[in-house]
Amino acid sequence: MFSLRGSRKRKRNAGICLLLGTVLVAGYLIYLTDHKTINLQDVKSDGGRTKAPTKNNSIAYSWPKCEKNVSAANSKNFSTFTVNYQDFLYYHHCRHFPMLLDNPDKCVGAHGSADVFLLLVIKSSPSNYDRREVLRKTWAEERLVNGKQIRRVFIIGTMDAAWEGERLNKVLELEQHQYNDILQWDFKDSFYNLTLKQVLFFEWLERNCPHASFLLNGDDDVFANTNNMVEYLQAHKDSNGNKHLFVGNLMVYSPLIRDTWSKYFVSVELNNAEYFPPYCSGAGIIMSVDTALVIYEMSKSIEIITIDDAYLGMCLAKAGLSPASHMGVQPHGWYLPSRRIDQYDPCHFKDKLVVHRFFSTNMFYMWKKLNDPNLNCTKK
């Protein structure tokens, strides 16, 4: 028998649940936008992601967590792959992940981003705090060089380990509070997810910093002479980043590795080509933002593979663009003809743009020496 009192009670309970749900959503959105006040009428949905305006009218986004595709285990030769590669295949379909730490105002909003001449995009891992600290005090310092603005972001995933992962996430939150330079997504930070990390950053770039001029796309163990980089880019025929530029250490006729034990393995099911298109080694690449956004557009129709730098080359090839070589970019370290020569003599690096495999103490030393006004590299 229908009860009017029961109906009213159910309606009242439903109203309470709706109110609680609204409060929780509002709280979550406030957290996402660095505790800025949000009018719920301004909150909109965009293809499954939540977005809300910040005080600078930029947008903070959060995607729902992507679910594991267990059917990937049914693919051919799955059991012969390493555990890390299997994990990559379980989430291979995912193109969007929730942002744990965002900085939508890094470029003073999308419209203000034209003032950013060089954005340093540094691939890091949660545990690499010491590297990030040294970079902030050396070549990645946010400053003006020749009147041009340099800004930086570290792009990071998460770690699986429960206690350690929680501690490292807390460290990243503290870093974000102090420096406002962390972009973190809720996916496993691993070698096999570097391409995913790259694509997620390009999505962020399109949304929050589309009018910047240039990017340095690099690892957190490279030495980058950003002073030289600004001079090189200012002398470029297009110093506003509105044309194609993609330079680094050029790789051509690189074969796809089919040995399952290799970390560079790519399965035939993902890509059956014999060679990758030309690309630049991912340790350090200089590109225009225009090219970066073209790559992002191409990535929407190209399957993600585990080799991030080769993937960028695939996107360039689809767009009909080519990478270029620059002798100042050395992704494999540097070679000296004799052990009697000091490999950390700053004069070896005075004209370089990017050198890979540089670690914290040497990074700090080299930056200070190169910026010493009394440095004399005149040959005797």
Image: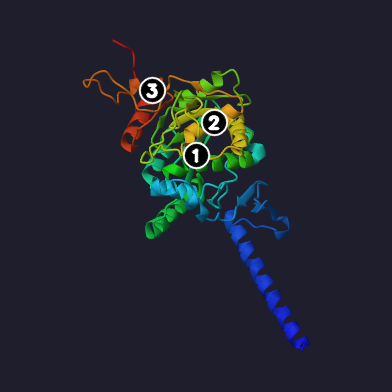
Label whose residue precedes the other's in the sequence (3 or 1)? 1
Alpha-carbon distance for marks 3 and 1?
Answer: 46 Å
Residue 189 visible in the snapshot: no
Relative horizontal placement of residue 250, taking residue 51 as reference (left or right): left
> Crowdedness of circle 2 by 10 Å Cα count: few (<14), some, many (20+)?
many
Q: Which residue is mark 3?
A: 373
Relative horizontal placement of residue 87, taking residue 261 as reference (left or right): right
Image coordinates of residue 183 in percent, x first then y, are: 52, 46
Q: Which mark is residue 266?
A: none
Image coordinates of residue 130 in percent, x first then y, are: 36, 44
* Residue type marked 2: Met
What is the image's colouring?
A: rainbow
Camera-nearest residue between 222 and 250: 250
* Residue type marked 3: Pro
Label whose residue precedes the other's in the sequence (2 or 1)? 1
Camera-nearest residue between 374 and 11: 11
**In which quadrant will I find the C terminus?**
top left
Image coordinates of residue 170 in percent, x first then y, are: 44, 56
SS at badge 2: helix
Camera-nearest residue between 13 and 181: 13
Alpha-carbon distance for marks 3 and 2?
Answer: 43 Å
Q: How many marks?
A: 3
Residue 59 visible in the snapshot: yes
> Crowdedness of circle 1 by 10 Å Cα count: few (<14), some, many (20+)?
many
SS at badge 1: loop
Q: Which residue is mark 2?
A: 314
- In this view, 250 is above or below 219: above
Q: Which mark is residue 305?
A: 1
| Badge 2 vs badge 1, beta-carbon distance below 8 Å | yes
Q: Residue at x 41, y 48 (%)?
A: 84
